[in-house]
Image (spheres, rainbow, N blue to C red):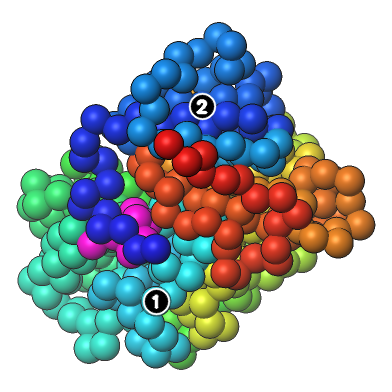
Amino acid sequence: MVLDGAKTAAGANKMVIRNIGLLLSGDLRQPILDADTVVAVDGLITAVGRQRDVDVAGAATTIDAKGTTLAPGLIDSHVHPVAGDWTPRQNQLGWIDSYLHGGVTTMVSAGEVHTPGRPRDVQGVKAMAVFAQRIFTAFRPGGVRVHGGAPVIEHGMVEEDFQELATAGVTILGEVGLGSVKDGKTARQMVAWARNYGIQSTIHTGGPSIPGSSLIDKDMVLETDADIIGHINGGHTALPGDQIVALCEKSTRALEIVHNGNEKAALLALRTAKELKQLDRLILGTDSPAGSGVQPLGILRMISMLAALGEIPAEVALCFATGNTAKIRKLEGGLVTAGRAATFVLMDRAQHSASKNLLESIQLGDLPGIGMVVVDGLVSVQRSRNTPPATTIPEIVPT
Ligand SMILES: [Zn+2]
């Protein structure tokens, strides 16, 4: 079912999701909530608690979770969209809708860099950013919210350009380093200008991704001081281990780990952040579409890999792709708490997993099965077409 995203938040609709077996908040400080019911009105969460304690009357939609797990919709912090639900990188249609079936309800652009013939002149860069911000605000495949319009800095940009972009609605920069600016001094100046106008920045870290991009080492990352250390595990080629550790230790900025990076380096970054007691800095992305394709289950695979091999509790790993990202990127979803977007993924252990329950299955390295995705208080997906089948799936209760 494909929803017209522009309409998803409209109307005085009440949704009740009850009989939740395990409620994952997305919040590192308390990842598991003692609650079995969520109530939402007009696309926003109004109550989270035990069914006997919350007002479940008058719901337009009631979902029986059947004892399965509810978590916030997943956030992919690093995508490279182009136009609508098409990616020219692998010439695929419908990739965003396919990610929705992997539990991803929000995506953040790290630059629309795969746009054929992408402009490199300042006027063209600004025009494309505004265009992308507009089209992805108006078009939500399956309900997925794509935060698009992420210009890549080029030589010749001046402070007024960032002011103009911010006034036009641009809130994020694409990866520093994918344009002509390759030196820390210029990048630092432009990132600071962007920050003055509320535009968040991210930087490419590591070796070149594809022909035409280039190496960015720890010295340039530290000098640039972007808000997010993009793919600290490389995209794909990672920096040497001592540089990754130095970035974790010497910077206080967000640490982004991506699917299309080096997995050994991902585990090093995770372990370093854990030793520093700074797991709240970790966020996850796919860095896709890319040379290695599109990964509808990429965020789930990262959660599972980090939990299983990084020896992090599954409910904590899930926070990296939900609450952490929402807080760092100031997004509307990502946490199951009153006032946040009623955007959820309902999961269960996959059929025939060797585990006894959902958390244990992730801990073992299995992928969960998705039984339902809710976006802004509306059911957007029932049984996922992409994950392994969930053992138990939620049901919409007939009214
Ligand atoms: Zn990159």
Q: Nearer the viewer, residue 219 or 129?
A: 129
Q: Which residues are magenta?
A: 139-146
Q: Nearer the viewer, residue 142 or 208?
A: 142
* Residue 67 lies in the magenta-colored region: no
Q: Position of residue 150 (x, y in %)?
A: 28, 61
Examine the rendered structure and indicate whether residue 321 appears above or below residue 134: above
- Which residue does the image show at 28% across and 67% down from the upper left? 152
Position of 117 with respect to 40 (left or right) is left
Q: Position of residue 276 (x, y in %)?
A: 72, 35
Residue ID for mark 1: 94
Q: Nearer the viewer, residue 122 or 264?
A: 264
Q: Quadrant of the N terminus?
A: bottom left
Q: Amino acid at mark 2?
A: Val
Position of 281 with respect to 129 (left or right) is right
Position of 310 with respect to 374 (left or right) is right
* The quarter of the displayed image where residue 90 is located: bottom left
Residue 38's label in the rendered image is 2
- Which residue does the image show at 21% across and 36% down from the upper left? 11
**Is any part of residue 283 visible from this angle?**
no
Q: Amino acid at mark 1?
A: Gly
Q: Nearer the viewer, residue 377 or 106?
A: 377
Task: Classify mark 2: residues with Cα within 10 Å, few (<14), some (14-19) or many (20+).
Answer: many
Q: Position of residue 115 (x, y in %)?
A: 28, 81
User: Considering only order in the chain, which callout, 2 or 1, is on the residue closer to the N terminus?
Assistant: 2
Residue 148's label in the rendered image is none
Q: Residue furthest top?
A: 53
> Gap in Å between the C-alphas at discs 1 and 2?
30 Å
Mark 2 falls on what kind of element?
A: strand
- Which residue does the image show at 31% across and 58% down from the upper left? 3
Q: Position of residue 195 (x, y in %)?
A: 27, 43
- Which residue does the image show at 52% across and 21% down from the upper left? 48
